[in-house]
Image (tube, rainbow, N blue to C red):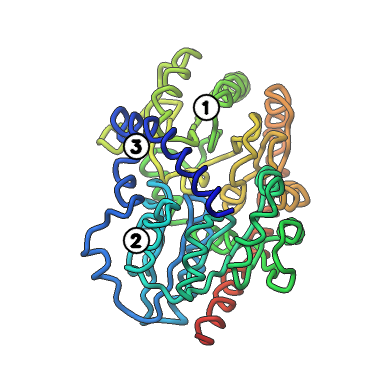
Amino acid sequence: MYILYNILLFIAAVLALPYYAARMILTGKYRKSLGPKFGFMGNKIFEEMNGSPRIWIHAVSVGEVTAAAPVVASLRTYFPEACIIFSTSTETGQEMARRIITTATSFIYYPLDIPWIVKKIITRVNPDIFILTETELWPNFMRTCRERGVKIIMVNGRISPRSFRKYAATRFFWKGVLDTIIEMGVISQIDAERLQVLGMTPSKIHVMGNAKYDSLAAKASRELQEEAEKRLNIAKTDRVFVAGSTHEGEEKITLDVYQCLLSNYPDFKMIIIPRHPERGQAVLALARESGFDDCITMTEINAGRSRTVERIIIVDVIGELFKVYSLATVVFCGGSLVPKGGQNILEPAAWGKVIFYGPSMDDFREERELLEKTGAGIMVESAAELRDRILELLSHPDDLMKRGEEGRKMVIANMGAAERYAEMIRTHIKER
């Protein structure tokens, strides 16, 4: 099966390489990560990996980095002399990691799952333990770890309905891959049950909660909010409609809703944060087509231009989403009115905001259920319903504030998972 997997992997790589090469040349994307993913890393990176034990933690992108951050912080308190190597798969994840994970020893890109590449990098990093954040399974890497005696642990494990369907179709193969994991902490009972169906040994699985609660609750501070207010020239009394992590098709919907908000509240501002920052110019063009000539981008603000009368701000850089949510009166969270499975609704909840989203929330089902119990999460089916529900809540400001506060309390009440994951990891390091 591994031979077949590697043949299919080689074919996929050959077919995909021209696409990624073109994107790199035309847009600059993947320019920083492509070489390291093929194993081309300078000696200096490995020379800086000092300390013991050697703990390698991997998070795919921004969302997983957020979950891993408090786990890394807890591990550093347990092992102050440890060499903590943190890897990501994406460039945006790498940038986020370098900003918020201040206690890591080294940062690297996760290698492509090609046998000779993973063997080379695992040999040079020489970890005692490998910690995988959430569920991304790379067979060659995990098999090599087992052959080298490197323990593999998964933290904050989750498996979305879409991922479950894909894995389930070839579960005969994935059972062997899952066997390389010696212990697994997962977010919910549903995740545990799905992994058991795929072949994970039940005794290895533990339901431990979501570490993202720890990260977000700790980050939401008045100082961070004041920083965002100052940069964007937003007053505490300003009404702001924040459309976060939007995908193509959702910006048009939220701009139409904003038009209606202005009819009732002429002082409303709007901030749009597209899920992929490179779409910033397309979103800007769409806003202008919708009749809004008074727009400004975060790139322009970072370059020294101040926002004055512009009603719409387009955040076309990474790392600003969480801070910007602090400015919101109401929030729409994207990837949900189009079939993308949703985006992280915990971030605005940590600030005490009411969050609207569409029906496509498969990747955040647990968070949705918890927020809807508090009234801070509201699902809508259409642009018209989004408009009407927002206007309804704005006409009852006390209810709006109460719902948001209940959501914030829920985030705080669910803290503690990161420490549980760190304790599980610590047990295996002590055994080693």
Label 2: which residue? 107
Circle number at residue 29: 3
Left or right placement of residue 408 versus residue 49 in this view: right
Circle number at residue 369: none
- Answer with the quarter of the image where residue 124 lies: bottom left
Q: Amino acid at mark 1?
A: Asp
**x, y percentage for residue 224?**
43, 54
Q: What is the CA distance from the residue labelled 3 to the residue labelled 1? A: 38 Å
Query: Residue placed at 43% from the left, 81% from the top?
Result: 79
Of tags 1 and 2, the one toward the viewer is 2
As helix, strand or loop, the secondary structure at mark 2 comes to strand
**x, y percentage for residue 143?**
52, 64
Q: Earlier in the sequence, mark 2 or mark 3?
A: 3
Q: Amino acid at mark 2?
A: Phe
**x, y percentage for residue 400?**
69, 42
Q: What is the CA distance from the residue labelled 1 to the residue labelled 2? A: 44 Å
Between residue 13 and residue 337, name the one nearer to us: 13
